[in-house]
Image (tube, rainbow, N blue to C red):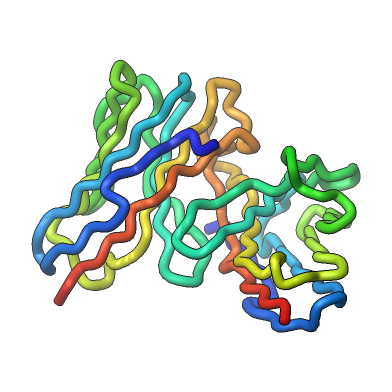
Amino acid sequence: SQQGEEDPQALSIQEGENATMNCSYKTSINNLQWYRQNSGRGLVHLILIRSNEREKHSGRLRVTLDTSKKSSSLLITASRAADTASYFCATAKPSGSARQLTFGSGTQLTVLP
Amino acid sequence: GAVVSQHPSWVICKSGTSVKIECRSLDFQATTMFWYRQFPKQSLMLMATSNEGSKATYEQGVEKDKFLINHASLTLSTLTVTSAHPEDSSFYICSAPRTGVGRAGANVLTFGAGSRLTVL
């Protein structure tokens, strides 16, 4: 079964608006990562947040992590049409092995021009 | 940055034939590669872990004889779907752990572009 559950499953916003996606997980983690997937393509790593971090920024991306609630959020500010893609969270167990990276169900983001 | 090349990007074959998908790390060595399967609008399901110089590790429920994995060198892993059937039609994606990104770098994956298999 999937470790991460994401919501919403689909999100449609206007260009310029902010997009927020949430991810919940069930077991202890070493870190949590967000990946982006354009339709019919592979995944691209966006950002990694360690279990001892609460917030991290990268450009227009802001990730938060609440280990007490076992949840994370990805905020994309000032969205652009090119941000249209599926976004997946992925959790790594405390052992740190890449084999143990488990992907969530994904959020399909559509940014309307 | 780390680049993983995967091909073919799409393939159509007749039922009963075998299809080979290649995954190459172009600018780094990958002793481990991962093969995922993805159904439309769904998440990635790890099929197997490919290990250079040794046997692949398959996830529960994945048929070893159906999905043959060979990791012949530090830059190449192949997935062969043997005697393919329509239910094997899917999007297959490979990835390799990215190195040199600090202690947490071992968790970060670089993905190939994926291969869409359609079995008629």
Nearer to me, A15 or B40: B40
The quarter of the displayed image where residue A112 is located: bottom left
Q: Where is B76 relative to A92, above or below?
A: below
Q: Position of residue A85 (x, y in %)?
A: 34, 64
Task: Tell me the residue at 32%/24% (across/down).
Answer: A53
The quarter of the displayed image where residue B9 is located: bottom right
Task: Tell me the residue at 71%/83% (across/down).
Answer: B12
Nearer to me, A63 or B116: B116
Q: Where is A31 relative to A68, above or below?
A: below
Q: Position of residue A98 (x, y in %)?
A: 61, 37
Q: Position of residue A48 (x, y in %)?
A: 40, 39
Nearer to me, B37 or B106: B37
Q: Is residue A76 left or right of residue A31?
A: left
Task: Tell me the residue at 14%/76% (across/down).
Answer: A113
Q: Residue furthest top?
A: A68
Q: Is residue B2 left or right of residue A62?
A: right
Q: Where is B25 relative to A105, above or below?
A: below
The quarter of the displayed image where residue A94 is located: top right
